[in-house]
Image (spheres, helix red, strand yellow):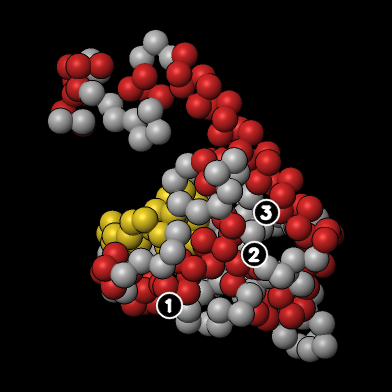
Amino acid sequence: SEPRLPGAWFDMAKRSAPGDPGAPLPSPQSADALILPHAHAFSLETASQASGIAADPPDGVIGCCAVSPGLVLLTLRAGSPSGYGLRDWPLLVGGAGVGDEPAFVLAYGGVVRSPLAVRFAAAAAAYMHGVDDACFCGGSFWDGLGDRPTLRQIAERAVETLRGPLPLDEADRERWLAAEAQAAGKLRVVDEYRRMARCPDLVAPAPVLRAEWLVPALRPLVA
């Protein structure tokens, strides 16, 4: 006999969107969700602005370069010296944004897909307020920026993330301060153990593998 789906799955497969009995269930993602920076039109447009940011960076941005087609690396230094200002923060901008398709959000809730992906390239960023556990900036990051923000607007908003976006109500401010304290605490622990390491090169902020550390067959990978 032919295999059959369990009843619950069968019901989901034939369910329609609310308010439109004949419409198919909206998908949370489209093919756009799989587009990488080099094939994402808006990412390419945004990356073309990197040289302008490098020549005239906003306050809190200490570096900007296009590392590959459609992908920009911003380096930020902002915030309290005892908080996020303890370190430089690399931020990658490019690729299809995170979130769901508008039709899915309208039907079931959620966050509409952002214009492009913005991600902190540092593990400690996962403890930031408004940043997910993969270090991508969430929906609140894009509030007021519109559908096609410039790279300068994105950079300025990222600096606000490190300084504390305003205005915040008292509850949000407390959550933001708690997230900053947690991230800063982890950074201080890392720095403490870094000073104790027998091989500082292995635990440097930007470690580089040396060919002599590897077996001969793997040395060409880092040559």
Check disc 2 and report its element: helix, strand or loop: loop
Q: Is residue 209 left or right of residue 32?
A: left
Residue found 41% across the figure and 67% down from its top: 58
Picture quarter containing residue 160?
bottom right
Mark earlier in primary sequence (1, 3): 3
Quickly name the residue at label 1.
Answer: 150
Check disc 1 and report its element: helix, strand or loop: loop
Check disc 3 and report its element: helix, strand or loop: loop
Quickly name the residue at label 3.
Answer: 129
Q: Is residue 27 above or below residue 2?
A: below
Instruction: Measure the alpha-carbon separation of dots 1 and 3.
Output: 23 Å
Quickly name the residue at label 2.
Answer: 165
Instruction: Measure the alpha-carbon separation of dots 2 and 3.
Output: 10 Å
Instruction: Measure the alpha-carbon separation of dots 1 and 2.
Output: 19 Å
x, y (%) of residue 66? 29, 61
Q: Is residue 17 above or below residue 180?
A: below
Q: Looking at the picture, which amino acid does disc 2 mark?
A: Pro
x, y (%) of residue 68? 27, 59
- Residue 82 visible in the shown view: yes
Q: Indicate which label's residue lies in the foreground, 1 or 2.
A: 2
Q: Looking at the picture, which amino acid does disc 1 mark?
A: Thr
Where, quadrant-wise, is the C terminus in this rendering? Answer: top left
Dot 3 surroundings within 10 Å: few (below 14), some, or many (20 or more)? Answer: many
Q: Is residue 108 left or right of residue 58?
A: right
Mark earlier in primary sequence (2, 3): 3
Residue found 20% across the figure and 16% down from its top: 212
Q: Looking at the picture, which amino acid does disc 3 mark?
A: His
Q: Indicate which label's residue lies in the foreground, 2 or 3.
A: 2
The reply to whether callout 2 and callout 3 are in contact (CB within 8 Å) is: no
Q: Is residue 223 left or right of residue 64?
A: left
- Residue 44 visible in the shown view: no
Residue found 67% across the figure and 68% down from its top: 166
